[in-house]
Image (cartoon, rainbow, N blue to C red):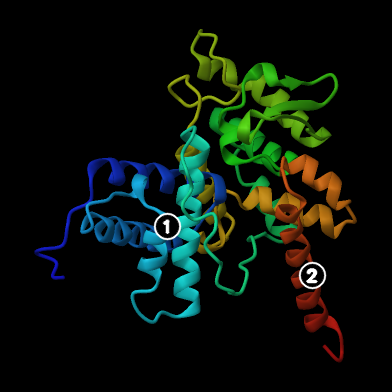
Amino acid sequence: MSKETAPSIAEADAASIAAFLERAWSEDGLADRTLDAYRRDLEALARWLAGRERDLSRARREDLSAYHGQGPAAVRTMARRQSAFRRYYAFRARNEPGFDDPTRLIERPKAPRSLPKALAEREIEALLGAPDVATTLGLRDRAMLELMYASGLRVSELVELPLAALNPRQGVLRITGKGGKDRLVPVGEVALERIEAYLAGARPALAKGRQPAALFLSTRGEGMTRQMFWTLVKRHALKVGIQPKRISPHVLRHSFATHLLNHGADLRALQMLLGHSALSTTQIYTLVAKEGLKRLHAQHHPRG
């Protein structure tokens, strides 16, 4: 089918793809290249379905199986397509009560598992020290970076954190994570000191006399967005020589998990701290830790 006669994507499909990609970027820290590939995969599927008078919301398992079986494709390409479709339909199932996920019973192709990106501890130290704490925004940025690394928060949890969630006396946060599940996470002394410095020296100026609910505020006196946080992470990373391709919105969360395991943390405890519903999700970080040890051995052992 030529481009001139290819069915167009329904507005509802285009809107749901955009919403999914924004959430995948902010929650999962996917790279721009991966997000672009997911967009192409989903738009191609939407056009294919439109040619059969269907849309993404009405796709059945048989439709997806027929789409996958159109012609030969590399295992990695198939795996990426299925990953895009599974993530997209899981996103819709979470946000649309009663939505039937057509990918549930489709067999997964075997492909190498990608590992979360984590920075070295010295790089984290440099990143945390990048904001200029002599300024209002520097106090805020330092507090946000310290808290995300100290507590392993998701980006959405960080920017949506209400002031009331912080218990400075006990040094804990009450976090409402995915699925509305609450968990208590420790803040740590250094992060708590930075938050208190922000509350005393920056937040009142940002609040402009109002009483906003959010803990971290933008220059407009409102809660911050995931995009704002991602922008400040990139800016501070570049300042200390960390290249953008090595940074994602989730890099501090991934580094939190990897560094805890490197220092002997229990996997079950890490699962609770991260708010993972399944231990298998947390176990991916053991692979990251093992890869780091292998690189360390290869670099420093005389027979590595």
**Quadrant of the image for the C terminus?**
bottom right
Q: In the picture provided, is 83 more to the left or to the right than 56? A: right
Residue lying at 23% horizontally and 57% vertically, measured from the top left:
52
Label placed on residue 290: 2
Could you say where residue 263 lies in the image, as x and y percent from the top left? 88, 56
Return the residue nearer the eye: 144 or 85. 85
**Mark 2 burial class by Cα count in 10 Å: few <14, some 14-19, many 20+:** some
Quick check: can you spot residue 95?
Answer: yes
Q: In the picture provided, is 27 more to the left or to the right than 65? A: right
Residue lying at 69% horizontally and 21% vertically, measured from the top left:
165
Could you say where residue 1 lies in the image, as x and y percent from the top left? 16, 70
Q: Amino acid at mark 1?
A: Leu
Q: Amino acid at mark 2?
A: Lys
Could you say where residue 119 lies in the image, as x and y percent from the top left? 67, 59
Could you say where residue 113 lies in the image, as x and y percent from the top left? 63, 69
Quick check: can you spot residue 134?
Answer: no
For label 1, the residue is 35
Label placed on residue 73: none
Image quadrant assignment for residue 18:
top left
Q: Secondary structure at mark 2?
A: helix
